Amino acid sequence: MDKTALLDKVQNLDEKGLKNLLSELKLYQDLKKKLGKRWEELFDRKHSWEKLLVVEYFASVWEDTAWEQAKNVYKKAFELDVLREKVKFISKDTLKWGIKVYIDDSMIDLSFSKIEKSIKK
């Protein structure tokens, strides 16, 4: 879209449309300033209403086993039915067994590394 067409669209917005545009521009500026390269992904996900779904699992745990556990966590903790294709799986040896389940910036830690850290305190 060229600049003149964009300018025409902005000039034809009503008060509510202008407020929404200003709100989006502020969000854009805030995300870009605070999150660096990660802002684009968050900004796009916000507008598509998609959630970032990640499961980190210990390398010895099979991905299928991690998926079965994560599916239960998503259902019970987040009240969300998810499709396996929407989940990003990451193998991590530092977990020392178990899984971590993420939805956007929220996380449920079911790993032994969490237990180990709590014992050392």
Image (cartoon, rainbow, N blue to C red):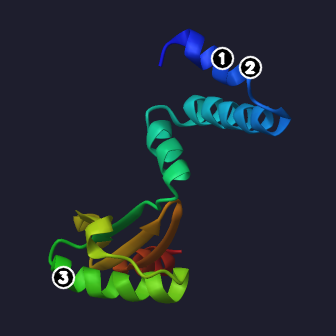
Tell whether 118 sits left or right of 24.
Answer: left
Give SS at disc 3. Answer: helix
The spot of residue 41 in percent (x, y) is 44, 43
Q: Residues within 10 Å of mark 3 (few under 14, many from 20)?
A: few
Give SS at disc 2. Answer: helix
Placement of 102 over or under 61, stated as above or below: above
Instruction: Check disc 2 and report the residue beneath it.
Output: 11
At label 2, the amino acid type is: Gln
Mark 2 touching mark 1, by CB under 8 A?
yes
Tell whether 11 sits left or right of 60.
Answer: right
Of the pair 1 and 49, the residue shown nearer to us? 1
Placement of 5 over or under 78, stated as above or below: above
Question: How far apart in space, not on screen, are marks 2 and 1 (Cα)?
Answer: 5 Å
At label 1, the amino acid type is: Asp
Instruction: Check disc 1 and report the residue beneath it.
Output: 8
Instruction: Check disc 3 and report the residue beneath it.
Output: 64
Give SS at disc 1. Answer: helix
| Foreground tag (1 vs 3) | 1
